[in-house]
Image (cartoon, helix red, strand yellow):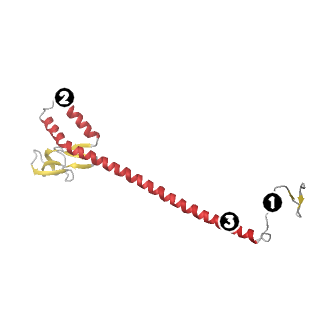
Amino acid sequence: MTDSQFVPDGEAVGEGVEETPSPEAVEPSEGLELLEAIDKVAELESLVAERTLDLQRVAAEYVNYKKRVDRDRDLARQSGIEAVVNDLMPVLDHIELAKQHESLEGGFRLIAEELQKVAAKHGLTAFGAVGEAFDPNLHEALMAVPMEEPVEVVTVSQVMQQGYLLGSRVVRPARVAVANP
């Protein structure tokens, strides 16, 4: 092997370096192979783009599925809490009546307080008090009973049964008597 060969433009061509063939120097069979290789690359790029779109679609479907499952889980949990709260409302009503008659003493008072703490922990709040303005979204008027002092708006004059909110949703409206202006 020779050390180097000189090319007419003055550059040396060393060992292991190939010259790029000019288009005229490419033989027809090599050109056909080159075109096939270019077609194969284009086909592979198209396939990669298609698979990328498929992967993006599957990822988006998974995100939507996860959101739907989380929402359904929250709804099922809330529904379970609401069912238990609906069953506890009569007990809470009786506790409130016992408080009004001052018949909660000792251990019964502690149990009643603990039960009310658990209900509040799950978002249950009682409403309906004498003197508050009547709201048809929160109150159910059973009768009209005048108050001792005159009122300017329709006002709750008696509470027959407390209402309950679970979060911001009315579970049961307060049953009340109202005083008209």
Alpha carbon distance from label 3 to label 1: 20 Å
Q: Residues within 10 Å of mark 3 (few under 14, many from 20)?
A: few
In what element is the residue under mark 2?
A: helix
Residue wearing tag 3: 37
Q: Earlier in the sequence, mark 2 or mark 1?
A: 1
Q: Nearer the viewer, residue 52 or 112?
A: 52
Alpha carbon distance from label 3 to label 2: 88 Å
Q: Nearer the viewer, residue 146 or 3?
A: 3
| Residue 95 coordinates in the image, percent (x, y) | 16, 37
Name the quadrant of the N terminus.
bottom right
Q: What kind of residue is marked 2?
A: Gly
Q: Is residue 51 left or right of residue 85?
A: right
Q: Nearer the viewer, residue 4 or 120?
A: 4
Residue wearing tag 1: 18
Classify residue 90 by image quadrant. top left
Q: Nearer the viewer, mark 2 or mark 1?
A: 1
Q: What kind of residue is marked 3?
A: Ala
Q: Is residue 84 visible?
A: yes
Asked if the residue at tag 1 contacts the one at tag 3, i.e. Cβ–Cβ closer than 8 Å, the answer is no
Q: For the point 40% across and 52% down, which residue is it? A: 67
Q: For the point 81% across and 62% down, which residue is it? A: 19
Q: Earlier in the sequence, mark 3 or mark 2?
A: 3
| Residue 71 coordinates in the image, percent (x, y) | 36, 51
| Residue 159 coordinates in the image, percent (x, y) | 14, 45
Q: For the point 41% across and 52% down, which residue is it? A: 66
Q: Is residue 75 left or right of residue 55?
A: left
In what element is the residue under mark 1?
A: loop
Q: Residue furthest front?
A: 29
Q: For the point 28% across and 42% down, which residue is it? A: 122
- The circle on residue 107 is 2
Q: Residue furthest top?
A: 106
